[in-house]
Amino acid sequence: MATSLRSLLRSGKNAVFLVARRGFQRSAPAGVQVTVRDALNQAMDEELERDERVFLMGEEVAQYDGAYKVSRGLWKKYGDKRIIDTPISEMGFAGIAVGAAMAGLRPICEFMTFNFSMQAIDQVINSAAKTYYMSAGLQPVPIVFRGPNGASAGVAAQHSQCFAAWYAHCPGLKVVSPWNSEDAKGLLKSAIRDDNPVVFLENELMYGVPFEMSEDSQSKDFTIPIGKAKIERQGNHVTLVSHSRFVGHCLDAAAVLAKEGIECEVINLRTIRPMDVESIETSVMKTNHLVTVEGGWPQFGVGAEICARVMEGSAFNFLDAPVTRVTGVDIPMPYAKILEDHSLPQVKDIIFSVKKTLNV
Amino acid sequence: FGKMLTSITNVLRACVQKNVSLHLSLFSLQHGRKCDLHKLEEGPATQVVMTRDEGLQYYRVMQTMRRMELKADQLYKQKIIRGFCHLYDGQEACAVGIEASINLTDHLITAYRAHGYTYTRGGTVKEIMAELTGRRGGIAKGKGGSMHMYCKHFYGGNGIVGAQVPLGAGVALACKYQGNNELCVCLYGDGAANQGQIFETYNMAALWKLPVIFICENNRYGMGTSVERAAASTDYYKRGEFIPGLRVDGMDVLCVREAARFAADHCRSGKGPILMELQTYRYHGHSMSDPGVSYRTREEIQEVRSKSDPISMLKDRLLSNNMASVEELKEIDVEVRKEIEDAAQYATTDPEPPLEELCNHIFSNNPPLEVRGTNPWAKLKSVS
């Protein structure tokens, strides 16, 4: 059953475009359209209801309903004790959240964007990520740090950075990067239930995008395992690996390439750390070609890690060409629209890269 | 009284030298509640002189800032300005009062509500607006946008809340180090006042007696959070603890000017930092994405507009003291309107930056380097 996907960005910042998608892995008999924002909201609502140790803290999360309205309605439902507005004190409240996690609660610490997490990164890495190890298993830190990551639209250099590579570099942290609504809901629930610190990287431009969600995903116990990638589209000629918003770009590129007889296999990483290298290797052993796509900068990035892992593993001998990385341009994000458009991978860049990799 | 006489004499002397009309007025500023002091024996002057020229200049500058922000509002709604846009209308007296008390050779840094300061620091309306619309004629060539505008002795325009405060103290350190008798005005909001890095900065600035004026523009709300919900103490002028502080009415340009003058004297006399809280108000929401009415009432906004608008207050002063006529002020309004229209015209027709600019300005004073584009075959060029 063909599923049509309408990407409608409610923020009104981007143009509306229509994408017809065929050959979905799983067809949903009784699906419903849910935006990524609502999926995240549902996940938090369900987990707050399920476990009274779960609480949410961050700037504007309570009375303002969330800077991006992700926590809409939660304060009204759960009150001051469970949904806490903080002052603009990232290092302070991140530390407070970690402390609360150490003492038995299960906080969700929201950063208004991950750019602001840099102010608190010591607490994320040194206090959250490393503690279970340093205490030899005595002290777990069951915390979720979540918020929008990466580029938005026109928010310039200080508000557009992707932190996937930074956080994924650190042992002790799990780093999750959902793409669609099902990812968002299932992975956030898993993150909250995980007894370890999880960095949950959302994307502001995806918040308003509706996706069809399966009937399964509407269950309150629906979770998606952390550490497992998903094949969004099957293909034989080239493997495209991506995470977050760029999964959509890959699928768009795949649709265009299919018309020219090039069948792409699109892998949605879902989790950056621990990375599902096995899924990538299995795919590469089938297609012999690999292109990674991300919004972050190239140096020491997600794509660079994938290249290294593939090279170190069994799939290397199956490659007919070097791995191609499609990444953000290696510059701070400019403001002017024409410059910004050229700072991030476009669908045409992916198509170009695939063809170069296939030497066609 | 002696000080007042001296300043009048100086003004008169200057007027005679410049052949301008002798028209000045003595204003008595309301004190008491309006100027609270912390660790200070005495505060700024409460009997002040404003000349006609000064009055007209303050009026023109504030009106220009007001109209510029309203035009930005318009252009944002037309989607010609994108991303973040934090407007300053309502707070004009702060920027104008501060600039009136310092020199262009002094330094200033603020956060993201920066268009007004970019103007008072020397940016033109044209280049500010062209930056907002992301064109090559913008003050940062279109690469910075609303929150990242710079000019001489003006260090932005900073997007990360609170980060500008240590930067400002650093600028002051450089001033002291270089012995140039300059100071740095370092601004932040009531929301930022709860940032740890500000307290770290207070400590070091006081310890090392840096010539920095910390100014908290308290507009009562940090995005959607009122001061009562964010701060255990809302006496922001006392938060510097060991740093002397004062709190003044930020809607009155003369109050701001006198307080800033007082603060500047304090700094330049080698006494170290001082902290000023300006009680002010923003008419717009936090940014253009915030309607600004979910956490405050329309009545409150309307009340401030009708009773405390900085431009109206100055206008009343000028008119009631016969320092200017209604027609004169109207003429200024017309001129300002035209300037803004021309600037908007420029800002909407100037072309976007050329693609060759994309990778430039990574490093300073550096040989050209190659920058990776979105794919390995895209080798882009970057020059300093």
Image (spheres, coloured by chain):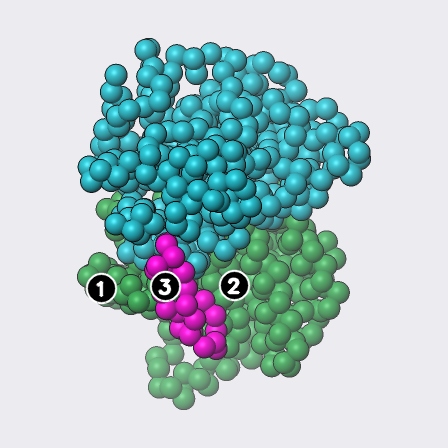
Q: Which residues are magenta?
A: B360-384
Evaluate whether label 3 is on the same chain as label 2: yes
B195 w.r.t. B156: above or below: above
- Foreground residue among B286 and A338: A338
- Foreground residue among B228 and A299: A299
Chain represented in green: B
A242 w.r.t. B330: above or below: above
Residue shown at 32% from the left, 11% from the top: A29
* Colour seen for chain A: cyan
Chain bearing tag 3 is B
Q: Mark 1 or 3 closer to N-term?
A: 1
Q: Is residue B194 visible?
A: no
Q: Position of residue B24 (x, y in %)?
A: 42, 72
Q: Position of residue B119 (x, y in %)?
A: 39, 65
Q: Position of residue A332 (x, y in %)?
A: 44, 58
- Which mark, residue B88? none
B365 in magenta: yes
Q: Are marks 1 and 2 in contact (CB under 8 Å)?
A: no
Left or right of B282 on screen, residue A79: right
Left or right of A359 on screen, residue A158: right
Residue shown at 44% from the left, 42% from the top: A318
Residue under label 1, please give it. B350
Chain bearing tag 1 is B
Q: Nearer the viewer, mark 1 or mark 3?
A: 3
Chain bearing tag 2 is B
**Label 1 vs label 2: CA separation?**
28 Å
Residue under label 2, please give it. B109
